Amino acid sequence: MSEPAPKQEEKKYTILFVDDEPNILRALKRALFKMNINMLLADSGKKALELLESNTVHVVVSDMKMPHMSGAELLEQVAKLYPETFRVVLTGFADIDSTIKAVNQGKIHRYLQKPWDNQELMNTLEEGLERVKLKDENARLQKLTRLQNKKLKDINSHLEQTVVKRTKQIKLALQRIEKHNLAIEQVLFNVISINPDIDGKFAIEVSELATLLAKRSGLPPEEIKLVRYACLIGELGCLGLKPADYATPFSKMNYEQQKNFLTQTRQAATILAPAQHMQPISDILEFQFEHYNGSGLYNKVAKEIPVGARILAISRDYWRCVTGRLTEKHMTPNEAKQELKKHRNTRYDATFLDVLLESPEIGMPKHIDNMLSANDLEPGMVLAANLYNDSHILILPEGHVFTDSTIAKMRSYEEDHGKHFEITVKPQQPESLPEETESSEAEEETL
């Protein structure tokens, strides 16, 4: 059993009595011996000031009429030098002028006459001590409040710093995750493109058209990003098929081949299943052959079909028409548009199909100004579009910040292959060059 904490000793307060008559001082000492106080005695104003200078005095009781320095004069100095003291006048003279002077100049708190009543005197002193105690307690609480406020401020400051630090760490962790996810996505596209029976250029064209349709339809940036990438790996499921199941134009396939061709949607979903963060992309690929009126592969209708899948269907089939993948005929851009128009609001969502039909520049030769080669690049330039090699393998992704290292590798690549890249960069902002990042280093590995 633990012992009780020792009782804190009560503070002893000091009272200074000033009187030029020794018998008065002795009488005061006798009258107040029961009070738990330190008692100081002075027979003059000068002696009183000396005691005040060398002791912490809480209450001063002074006679009014004394030689050399009156009680009023003494208490006036006490009020100036020790304003926190409780000041009492004790006198046998009913001198109104002296009393007024003591009140005004000495700022006394109480006035007692000789002969005094012991109880009244003790009550007055207790009142003075109580007032001093209250002031002490107030000062203690104020000091404690200041200390606690400072401690709280320090805690808050530390907490804010911790929050800022943790937030920065979380952001960096999320950036690393995003960069790693992006690297996985880039690798997936390259795995598709390196297959000799799957055309990487077709995937690029489908992705660019789908991105244009998504932007012009007012989709939010995150959804546009999903559409762009989903269309880039739109033929992922074909990796699980035999070339005969997808290399023949769709209209020339027999029933069994068409059935096998459409299983690519399930194959894509299976490939992406371990990557939970890619579920929205998986959904786009799985439902890309749905028909807007509900007559598609899984009988999903209208808004049940993901937006990205509806856009992918239009972009994919436009380029299937142009490249002869739908029929043996290679259609012109206008013929391809008219072919898709036949299935407006049955196979295709009119919202996105109309954007295609109302865009006459689609299918026209592309003219891109300010194309650069590796020799034109400078550190800090930002890649404006995905960069592919002649085999349609992704070399660097859009948004890559060029560094001395990547530029050197690009120039070496051009020299080794005897061809120049056609590179577009974003307009440069007037700011300091970014540091080489983890993602830049990872991207350099593909060169």
Image: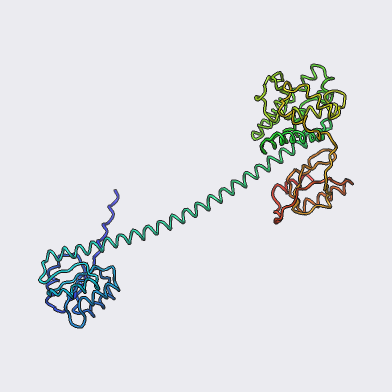
User: Where does residue 73 sit, x and y in percent of width and height?
Assistant: 23, 77
For residue 122, above or below residue 20: above
Q: Residue furthest right?
A: 418
**Can you give x and y, in whole percent of width and height, for residue 23 in the image?**
11, 77
The x, y position of residue 140, in whole percent, is 33, 60
Whether residue 235 is visible here, answered yes or no, is no
187 lies above or below 98: above
Question: Left of 6 or right of it: where is 428?
Answer: right
Q: Is residue 362 visible?
A: yes
Relative depth, front residue between 8 and 175? 175
Report the number of numbered marks: 0
Residue at 25 percent of width and 75 percent of height = 76
Q: Residue at x 84, y 30 (%)?
A: 333
In screen coordinates, is 101 left or right of 441? Answer: left
Q: Considering depth in this image, is 349 or 311 the residue closer to the camera? A: 349
On screen, 302 above or below 14?
above
The outermost residue toward the top is 255
- Which quadrant would residue 345 be assigned to in this image? top right
- Give residue 85's quadrant in the image: bottom left
Foreground residue among 381 and 211: 211
Q: Nearer the viewer, residue 105 or 27?
A: 105
Q: What residue sits 74% from the left and 27% below the top?
A: 313
Task: Answer left or right for 447 relative to 68.
Answer: right
What is the image's colouring? Answer: rainbow
Residue 20 position in % (x across, y down): 16, 79
